Image (spheres, rainbow, N blue to C red):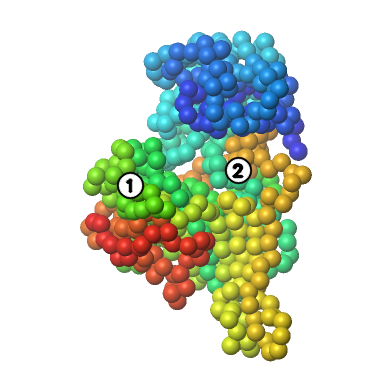
Amino acid sequence: MNKTANQMLVIFGASGDLTARKLVPALFNLYKGKHLPENFIVLGASRSNMSDEEFRQKVVYESSYLKERVKAGQEDFIKAFSDKLFYEDLGKDYDTDYTNISNRIKELNKKFGTNDNFIFYFSTPPNLYEVIAKNLSDQGLNDESKGWKRLIVEKPFGYSLETAKGLNNGLQKYFNESQIYRIDHYLGKETVQNLLVTRFSNSIFEPLWNRNYIHHVEITNAESVGVEKRGGYYDKSGALRDMFQNHLLQIVSFIVMEPPIDASAEEIRNEKVKALKSLRIMRDEETLAKNTIRGQYLASEIEGKKVKGYREEDDVDPQSMTETYAAIKFFVDNWRWKDVPFYVRTAKRMPTKVTEVVIHFESPHHQIFKDSDMSNKDNKLIIRIQPDEGIMIKFGVKVPGQGFKVERANLDFYYSSLSETNVMEAYERLLLDAMQGDATLYARADEVEAAWSFVDPILNYWENSPDVRTYGYSAGVWGPKNGDDLIEGSMGWRNPGEHMADDPGFCVIC
């Protein structure tokens, strides 16, 4: 494992929700697990007027997210961690004179021996990324002559291909691409990383990982909650931008990519870019109409509790056409995956929370057990990303007794069975990787742009064509009824669990 050098983490937007909810708890766990160097400190910066002590009080002592990680009798331990946190008020605007924060960074660097190694975490809206980068550059805080300097930027990284290119160009004016880490917390999940290990460390899988043995690939990301308090953001984004363009296409790239030369960050990311560039871009309206479906959840009752429809949520336009359900069928234009359909869906207000990849294998070329209860496509490899993280193989076995009656059996592994192993949370893993200079699980500029190149035509079609329909589905079911029609042969999606409400079927709300 890489050694973590002495360093300082500077968080811009430190008074926001992400710092208290994700970043500080992740840092606390890394501190508790002795993954942080002895000389490590955090400097929060934002437009809120706070002292060091007030900042510590807010993100440590008053944090409900941290309390669940703290055990009784750890007061001294908590104080030692809290003493590593500092704060600097930027004033009323992020585009201001950074002399004060530059001086504070230099003062803390000298006092705590962080060796001029700085990570700048941009927990701010994307429109501030270039502003902050420029001001840091003006203070010479991008100069690596005395120590390394890195940026971590949060999603959404762009709203379209054009805006993503603008963000890339804006950051690259002041920092080298090698210094920029675009975070996608899905890549911090052990089961997403395990896709690579499953494929490339097991000779039983990789020889089958192609068009000769795989019938189709299915990826589902389902959330049981609605938009909650994110209505204002979500109504300008939608399911395709919020989940598909980043999280799910990252998973697709791991499935599609060719074996890298080695496990280095650049080689893995090179293959991911090639994978994303091989996705067949849908441009004509006939193809887009046939292979994409969008939907929006409607008011319903789940387990006796009334649930709002999307248009009734706070800060959502009552006439909104923003999709909360998106299902896409597409193909990959290379030798390995020629003519193998990929089906990807993401949605809110589903019956359960689940993210999983299902590899559907071809049926045997010659069926000798035609009268069995097994369907032709019952050989599956299921990789559960969340919850109940693990992997399962479904295959046929003989039922004891006379004849050859076949039924399905499961062979499975769950991460929860590793009781001796501490599984890092996503932000813990990703922060530690950035501290150690490992960019494997971070997106590169060309990778982001390749993903947007595939998604842009779908978004343009949905937003600009008068013929596009938005189908309603009751909160608590597996999306619009015609969503299953996307998968050829009427096989339908694999739906863990049961429907929990009446499906309105082909309800068109636009």
Q: Nearer the viewer, residue 241 or 161?
A: 241
Image coordinates of residue 100 in percent, x first then y, are 50, 10
Image coordinates of residue 351 in percent, x first then y, are 45, 56
Tell me the kind of residue under disc 1: Lys
The vertical placement of 449 against 99, above or below, is below
Q: Is residue 205 left or right of residue 89?
A: right
Nearer mark to the viewer, of 1 and 2: 1
Q: Is residue 122 left or right of residue 310?
A: right
* Badge 1 density bin: few <14, some 14–19, many ≥20, Cα 10 Å: some
Identify the element where label 2 is drawn.
helix
Q: Nearer the viewer, residue 160 or 309?
A: 309
Q: Quadrant of the C terminus?
A: bottom left
Q: Is residue 298 left or right of residue 20?
A: left
Residue at the spot of label 1: 308
| Residue 457 seen in the current view | no
Name the residue rendered at 76%, 38% in the picture: 1
Tell me the kind of residue under disc 2: Gly
Residue at the spot of label 2: 188
Name the residue rendered at 58%, 45% in the picture: 187
Q: Gap in Å between the C-alphas at discs 1 and 2?
A: 32 Å
Name the residue rendered at 28%, 62% in the picture: 507
